[in-house]
Image: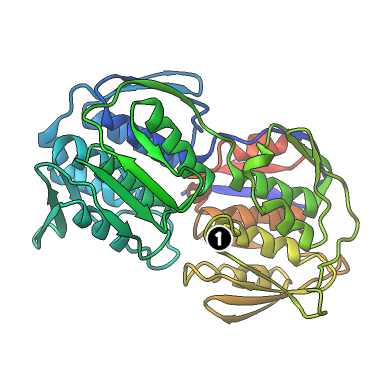
Amino acid sequence: MGSFIIEGGHPLRGTIRPQGAKNEALQVICATLLTSEAVTIHNIPDIRDVNNLIQLLRDIGVKVSRSGNTYTFQADTLNLDYLESDEFVQKCTELRGSVMMIGPLLARMGKAIITKPGGDKIGRRRLDTHFLGFQKLGAKFNHVPGRDVYEISATRLKGTYMLLDEASVTGTANIVMAAVFAKGTTTIYNAACEPYLQQLCLLLNQMGAKISGIASNLLTIEGVSTLHGAEHTILPDMIEVGSFIGMAAMCGDGIRIQNASVENLGIIPEAFRRLGVKVKVEGDDLFIPRQRHYEIQSFIDGTIMTLADAPWPGLTPDLLSVLIVVATQARGSVLFHQKMFESRLFFVDKLIDMGAQIILCDPHRAVVVGHDRKICLRGGRMTSPDIRAGIALLIAAMSASGTSRIDNIEQIDRGYEDIEGRLNALGAKITRSDK
C-alpha cells in the first residue's frame, strides 16, 4: 500500500492544466463496444480506474492501440466465453465503471452479466435504475445464486417510454447505450443531463445513433441497426478543476487553471465564491489569486450558508469533500448537506484530528466553523477512504503545519493522474513512498 509524505506550508504558484474527465472516459470507452469499427478517443486520463477498464476491454477481445493520451478501440471480435467466466465477474466487482459495459453488451450481443461493481466505499450505490431501465426495454433477468450474479438477456430490445426513479448518471448512460439498438423509439424522462452524459450522446450520434434532447432531462432515442466508427475528445475533468480551485484557495500564491472548459463547470466556481474564494474567468482559464482571508457568504436573509449536493446542474457531490476543507480556513460558518451517499462525510474525523472545527451532525450533515487562518491545521497520519476524500486530505496536508502521511493513496490514483508530480511543479513538497 503506497503513501504520500507531505511537507506542509509551501505556497503553490504557476499554471496547471486539468486532465481528461474520468467519468466521461468510463462512459465513452464502454460505448466503443457498440460497433465493430474503430473508435478513436483523445484526452483519456492515465489513471487507475480508466486503465483498469481499458484492460478489461482488452481481456474480452477489444483491440486497443495508444499514442500518448489518444486511444483507438476496435471491438470487432469479442470473446463471449470470457464474458461469462468467473475471472471476468471477479474483475467487474473491483471496478465500478464496469457496470457501463452492460448496456452496450446487451444491445449488441443480446446478453450480459451483472454483478455488484466495486468503487469507492461511500455507502450504498444501488443499481435499481439500471435494472428497471433494461426491463422496460424488454430484457429478462435470471439470478444465479451460487455466483451471486444476474444473467440478463434479450433477443431484441424494444423502445418504450420510461420515467427513471432517479437521475442516475451511470444508469442513464447504460440505458441510452442499450436503447440505441432498440426497435422503435425510447423516451427517457428524468434522465441525467450532466456534461459527460451529453458528451456520450454526442459521440453516439457521431457513430450513427439518433438521440435528441441532449442537455435536457428528456432524451428521445430512435433505434438504429448499426453504429460505425468515430473520433471524440474528452472534456477536462470538472472535479479536478474544482480540486485545484480548493488547493489554490488554501495554499496558493496565484494559480492559473488552464483550458478549464469554463462553460461546462456549471455551479462549481460559484460554490467556491460562496465560501469567499475569488475565482476569475479569463478566457477559458480560471485564475485564483492569493487570498490571505476569504469570508463565507450568508443567505440574503442573513441565515447561515448551506451547500448541498444535487443532480446536474446542481452541485456535484464529488466536490463536497474539497469544499469542506476549504471552509476550515474561511471566516464564518457553513452547513454542508451531503444527500446522496451516507458515508462520504465520515472523513471529517481526520480533519478534526488536524485541528479543524467541524460538527458532524449525522451521516449527511456537517457544520464547519472556519478558523480564518488564525489556527493552522496540524500535520498527521491519515488514510484515504475514497478518491475525493483522499484529494481533500491531500489539500489539508499541504496547508497544514508540519509533515503529514496519507496511506492508501491508490484511492487517489484512481482519479488523479501523477498528482504529486504536477503539484510539486507548482511548489508542493510531496513524496511517494511504498514503505
Scheme of colours in the image: rainbow
Element marked by disc 1: helix
Q: Residue 267 in the image: x percent, y percent?
A: 67, 54
Residue 286 higher or lower than 1, as above or below? above
Answer left or right for 349 relative to 54: right
* Residue 99 visible to the viewer: no
Viewer-side residue, 63 vs 48: 63
Quarter holding residue 295: bottom right
Q: Amino acid at mark 1?
A: Pro
Answer left or right for 381 relative to 67: right
| Few, some or many residues within 10 Å of mark 1 (<14, 14–19, 20+) | some
Q: Residue 241 in the image: x percent, y percent?
A: 66, 44
Residue 25 higher or lower than 321, as above or below? above
Residue at x-position 69% and y-position 40%: 262
Viewer-side residue, 205 vs 428: 205
Q: Residue 51 in the image: x percent, y percent?
A: 40, 34
Q: Circle 1 sits on which residue?
A: 317
Viewer-side residue, 427 vs 31: 31
Quarter holding residue 61: top left
Residue at x-position 61% and y-position 57%: 319
* Residue 67 visible to the viewer: yes
